[in-house]
Amino acid sequence: MSRETIPVTVLSGNLGAGKTTVLNNLLNTQTDLDIAVLVNDMGEVNVDAERVAEHSDISEDDEELIELSNGCICCELRGDLLDALAKLAQAREFDYLVIESTGVAEPLPVAQTLTMGFDQSDLDPTEFYEETGIEPMDYYELDTTVTVVDAHQFWTTFGSAESLMDGDTEKDLGSLLVEQIEFCDVLLLNKCDLVDEAALDEIEAVVEVLQPRAEILRTEHGAVDPDAILDTGRFDFEAASQSAGWMQELEEPHASAEEEHGVTSFVFESRRPFHPERFADLLNELPTNVVRSKGHFWLAGREDIALGIDVAGQSIRLTPAGQWLATLPADEQAQYFEAYPELEESWHPEYGDRGSQLVLIGTDMDHDDLRADLEAATLTDEEMDADWSAFEDRFPTFERLEDAEEAADGDAQSAESAEEVGLAD
Ligand SMILES: Nc1nc2c(ncn2[C@@H]2O[C@H](COP(=O)(O)OP(=O)(O)OP(=O)(O)O)[C@@H](O)[C@H]2O)c(=O)[nH]1
């Protein structure tokens, strides 16, 4: 194959989901492609690379098997990843690259690194890059992101609050699984030999709501047709980072073909602020069948910025989601109205654009009950007239207004100011 850039497939997926098994299968399946492999392992010894070497034609001494150990390519090893790719590109004796990330890798930053390289990202240049000036991403193109999901462990992981240290941040396996599902082009539902048909249908229904864009394939022992994950041309950064089910839900509530599996979703909207104490209590006691929730909300007493919320499994993350336009001078507001006329239509005479919009996705959710609970957590008529600053407020305070602006500009999930909270009493 001769082309200007080398296409890349990235394999993600929770610990033990079957990434190495998929990779070995791929390397042992005859394709026309000469595949180079980069394996990332958290430990000092790259066990996965050893296993790849053991089970395929590629040996550990081979230049086309790169090992990156002792860290994760979604955080501290991003620069090393690019260096390794630059060195590999110089040899260029292969025509496809497959990257196996660690089980704790977040796919979005990996894809970001591979899309932006050193030139466009905020990465500090490495010594190698400064010496050679080679921008690896001139040589590569991200082609397909694949998430391998363990069907057998699915519900256990989904509801898991087991926390794991991932670089400097702590997160739980459940929310990592959701992120990995939400950000992929192809999803391999692996270990199907261990799960019956009805249970697989149920898992697929949840996955389809979380990630309507991906192709979902059922696999056993990682056996997959190479054409399904190599050279598919499916990767599209914008689409991938925007395609999560909750986003689509805001635009166009989906017809509930999934309802037979009890997977549903709804949008809660209110122009009244939440009472800080009642809303914190509600979030702390959110039923476990609410598997995903995202959106922004207005908290009484926080009239400057909107707060963003991201619930996945057992974890709740809060971010500053942007400044309310109501806080801006009239001339700046007028500019927004011109660009977005619908803003003016929904403008409240006293509160402006302040309000809440939350999407909830879950299994067997009682929409009416949940809606009533959310409604009850907003201020009553009497409270609307009270002094809001006197309410007890356990939500994190975001010191800098720039935090809000950064989060509004970019991806709220990666905003450094995100806080994982317990909202304890
Ligand atoms: N029964 C069954 N076992 C599988 C299947 N796929 C993989 N396994 C087994 O599951 C275990 C984990 O598989 P790996 O391929 O090492 O998973 P991984 O995602 O690379 O794991 P980490 O590198 O630790 O994140 C191994 O013992 C595999 O043999 C499958 O479809 N069915």
Image (tube, helix red, strand yellow):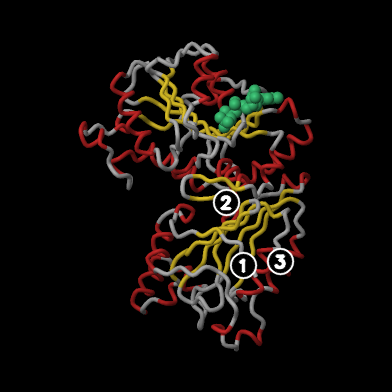
Q: What residue is rendered at 50% in x and 44% in y? A: 166
CB-based contact (under 8 Å), mark 3 and mark 2: no
- Quadrant of residue 216 within the rendered picture: top right
Judge from the rendering whether residue 425 lies leftward or rightward of residue 4; answer left or right: right
Relative height, residue 303 to residue 45 (above, below):
below
Which numbered disc flags the more N-terminal residue, 3 or 2? 2
Note whether ligand 1 is within 8 Å of mark 3: no
Which numbered disc, 3 or 1, marks the residue that appears first in the sequence? 1
Q: Is mark 3 on a helix, strand or loop?
A: helix
Report helix, strand or loop for mark 2. helix
- Residue 68, image x and y in percent? 42, 30
On the rendering, which quadrant does ligand 1 occupy?
Answer: top right
| Amino acid bearing label 2 | Gln
Query: How far apart are the two marked residues, 3 and 2, measured between alpha carbons?
Result: 20 Å
Q: Is residue 400 above or below residue 184?
A: below
The structure residue drawn at horizontal position 36% and vertical position 78%, both measured from the top left corner, is 329
Residue under circle 1?
269
The residue labelled by disc 2 is: 248
Foreground residue among 238 and 347: 238
Query: Label 2: how many residues lie within 10 Å, few (<14), some (14-19) or many (20+)?
Result: some
Give percent across and percent down for residue 267: 64, 61
The amino acid type of the residue labelled 3 equals Arg
The residue that disc 3 covers is 371
Amino acid type, mark 1: Glu
Left or right: 368 as drawn, with respect to 232: right
